[in-house]
Image (cartoon, rainbow, N blue to C red):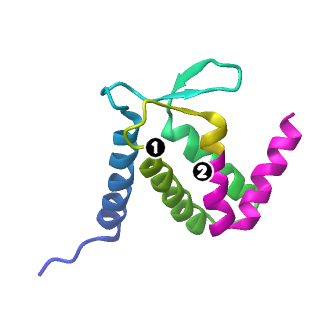
């Protein structure tokens, strides 16, 4: 009997998350979901941008790479599930969803995210 390789198992998990994220990009009318920024401008939802932001906060919180990757995927999966079927989402609502999940999963990462926002302003 053939055993599944580690690589195949990881790619399978990754593809499930990516599929859910791709599905969440489509709104009720089959169009790409838009993120409405604070200034009113819209841009297409980018799972890559979200994953990059979460990963950056995890790096700032000194999480190990392995733990950070797993948690970042889990949070992206959660966000994708919450946004599934929506036409658009405000960036502030997206932030609230991510930070609520981070508060439950990794308080240090949530704090790192908030500190980065303060420094940015």
- Which residue is depicted at the point 55% across and 63% down? 71
Task: Return the residue found at the far left.
Answer: 1
Question: Where on the picture, by quarter, is residue 104?
Answer: bottom right
Question: What SS does tag 2 mark?
Answer: helix
- The label on residue 107 is none
User: Magenta stretch: residue 116 in it?
Assistant: yes
x and y, in percent, of residue 65 in the image: 61, 63
Q: Which residue is mark 2?
A: 97
Task: Return the residue found at the far bottom.
Answer: 1
From what the image shows, is residue 64 above or below residue 99? below
Question: Where on the picture, by quarter, is residue 23?
Answer: top left
User: Which secondary structure class fits the magenta region best?
Assistant: helix
Total of numbered circles in the picture? 2
Q: Which residues are magenta?
A: 96-121
- Which residue is depicted at the point 31% across and 67% down? 9
**Which image quadrant: the C terminus?**
top right
Q: Which residue is mark 1?
A: 83
Classed neighbour count for the residue bearing mark 2: other residues with Cα under 10 Å, few (<14), some (14–19), many (≥20):
some
Question: What SS does tag 1 mark?
Answer: helix
* CA distance separating discs 1 and 2: 10 Å
From what the image shows, is residue 101 above or below residue 114? below
- Which residue is depicted at the point 28% across and 71% down? 5
Question: Does residue 98 appear to the left or right of 30 in the view shown?
Answer: right
Pick the front one: 31 or 68: 31
User: Magenta stretch: residue 46 in it?
Assistant: no
Question: Does residue 43 appear to the left or right of 84 in the view shown?
Answer: right
State yes or no: discs 1 and 2 in contact (Cβ < 8 Å): yes
x and y, in percent, of residue 32 in the image: 39, 27
x and y, in percent, of residue 17 in the image: 39, 53
- Which residue is depicted at the point 67% across and 54% down? 99
**Circle nearer the N terminus (1, 2):** 1
């Amino acid at each position: 009997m053939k055993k599944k390789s580690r690589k195949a198992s990881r790619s399978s998990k990754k593809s499930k998350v990516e599929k859910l994220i791709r599905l969440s990009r489509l709104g009720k009318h089959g169009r790409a979901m838009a993120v409405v920024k604070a200034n009113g401008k819209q841009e297409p939802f980018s799972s890559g941008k979200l994953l990059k932001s979460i990963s950056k906060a995890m790096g700032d919180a000194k999480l190990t790479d392995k733990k950070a990757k797993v948690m970042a995927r889990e949070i992206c999966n959660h966000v994708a599930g919450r946004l599934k079927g929506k036409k658009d989402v405000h960036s502030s609502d997206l932030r609230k969803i991510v930070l609520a999940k981070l508060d439950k999963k990794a308080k240090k990462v949530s704090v790192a995210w908030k500190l980065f926002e303060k420094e940015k302003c």
